[in-house]
Amino acid sequence: MTERVLILSGSSSDKPIIDKITQVLDAFGVIYKYEVASAHRNPEKVDQLIATSTADVFIGVAGMSAALPGVIAARTIKPVIGVPVNASLDGLDALLSTVQMPPNVPVAAVGIDAGKNAGILAVQILAINDEVLKKKLVEFKESLKK
C-alpha cells in the first residue's frame, strides 16, 4: 500500500517528535513514510520525495530556520503541516518561520514540538473523505471527554 502521509524532518535529532506523530498515525491505522531530508543540506532529496510521493498530506518537522515545511508547500498543492522544533530560542524562531509564510503558500502550523497534534490534524484532513477514519476520530474525541 502507498503512504497517505509523508513525514519529512530536517534532522535525525527530530526523532522524538517524529515518534509522537507516528504513534498517532499508527493508532488510527494510517500508512505513512518517514524520511530525513534537510531543505538546506539536501534540497534535491526533498524535491525528489515530494515529486514522487503519493501521500495526501505532508508533515514537515524542522527547527531553527524551519524552512522545510515552506519548501514542501512551495512544491505541492496538497496540505502541509509544519511542526516547529525547539532547537534554539525556545523554538520561537522555528514557530515564526513556520507560520510566517508568504501569501498563497500556506502551511498549517501546530505548536512547538507538538508532533501529536500534527498527527491528529493529518488524520482529520484524511477523514474528510474516509468514513473509517471519521468514525475513529469521533470515538477518539468522545474518549477525551472521559
Image (cartoon, grey):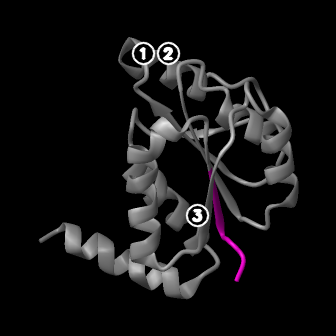
Q: Secondary structure at mark 1?
A: loop
Residue 106, image x, y percentages: 70, 37
Q: From the viewer's perspective, is residue 129 above or below residue 48?
A: below
Q: Earlier in the sequence, mark 2 or mark 3?
A: 2
Question: Marks 2 and 3, how far apart in space?
Answer: 27 Å
Asked if marks 1 and 2 touch (Cβ < 8 Å), the reply is yes
For label 2, the residue is 93
Q: Earlier in the sequence, mark 3 or mark 1?
A: 1
Question: Marks 3 and 1, how far apart in space?
Answer: 30 Å
Q: Which residue is outermost to the top?
A: 89
Residue at 68 percent across and 25 percent down: it is 101
Q: From the viewer's perspective, is residue 109 above or below residue 95?
A: below
Residue 86, image x, y percentages: 40, 26
For label 1, the residue is 88
Which quarter of the figure has residue 89? top left
Residue 90, image x, y percentages: 35, 17
Q: What amino acid type is highlighted by mark number 2?
A: Asp
Q: Secondary structure at mark 2?
A: helix
Q: Secondary structure at mark 3?
A: helix
Q: Is residue 5 magenta?
A: yes
Q: What amino acid type is highlighted by mark number 3?
A: Ile
Residue at 57 percent across and 27 percent down: it is 99
Q: What amino acid type is highlighted by mark number 1?
A: Ser
Near mark 1 (Cα within 10 A), the count class, few <14, some 14-19 or many ≥20, is few
